[in-house]
Image (cartoon, rainbow, N blue to C red):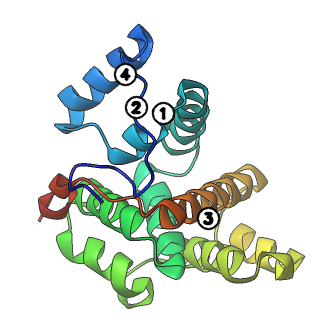
Amino acid sequence: MAHDAPTALNLPMVDPLPAATQKYFDVCQQKLGMVPNVLRAYAFDIDKLNAFAAMYNDLMLGGSNLSKLEREMIAVVVSSVNKCYYCLTAHGAAVRELSGNPILGEQMVMNWRVADLDARQTAMLAFAENLTVASAKTSESDRQALRDVGFSDRDIFDIASVAGFFNMTNRVASATDMRPNDAYHAQSR
């Protein structure tokens, strides 16, 4: 794979990009200092890119009682179980940045259970991990454990949605050998 290619697949980006897509990429460049390779990977098909970006932006940036950090923590736990190199690198960096704690970011990537988390975060991450490992075994007692630490049913839906999204994206990233941007490795350390 070429060093600057976002995946091992030969799926070049649409060229030229539609104006709205180019504007989105320009915003990423301005805010992040890069266009994340996951976006470049989907840019061979603008409809797929738009669907991916809309779902990501809704789940990770949209309205929710879950904080952005909590959503990133879910992404890292799911990605850790799935051993998704791309997402562990990118979302591990996000946990470091949002928490202001590089140690927490590393703990989340390596073994989230060693992190000093409160009961709410622990229940949330255990639920996300269980959904990833054996989703069909999820029961009312699992949902009740989340309610017992203060999550509403809407929150449970949001936790499940974030976990489900990253289970999907982890598989796409692994199947295509998606590579994280080099810049993620040094962020917020």
Say whether disc 4 or disc 1 marks the residue closer to the N-terminus.
4
* Amino acid type, label 3: Asn
Residue 125 % position (x, y): 56, 74
Residue in the foreground of this view, choosing between 84 and 64? 84
Visible residue check, residue 154: yes
Identify the residue under disc 2: 13
Rate crowding at label 2 as few (under 14), some (14 to 19) or many (20 or more) other CA atoms within 10 Å: some
Do labels 4 and 1 touch, CB within 8 Å? no
Q: Residue drawn 31% across and 82% down? A: 107
Q: Residue drawn 41% across and 39% down? A: 39
Identify the residue under disc 1: 44
Looking at the image, is mark 4 or mark 1 nearer the viewer? 1
* Amino acid type, label 1: Phe
Separation (CA) of disc 3 from disc 2: 24 Å
Identify the residue under disc 3: 167
Rate crowding at label 1 as few (under 14), some (14 to 19) or many (20 or more) other CA atoms within 10 Å: some
Do labels 3 and 4 touch, CB within 8 Å? no
Separation (CA) of disc 1 from disc 2: 4 Å
Q: Quadrant of residue 29?
A: top left
Separation (CA) of disc 3 from disc 4: 25 Å
Q: Is residue 36 above or below residue 86?
A: above
The residue furthest front is 10
Say whether disc 1 or disc 3 marks the residue closer to the N-terminus.
1
Say whether disc 3 or disc 4 marks the residue closer to the N-terminus.
4
* Amino acid type, label 2: Met
Residue 169 % position (x, y): 56, 57
Identify the residue under disc 4: 24
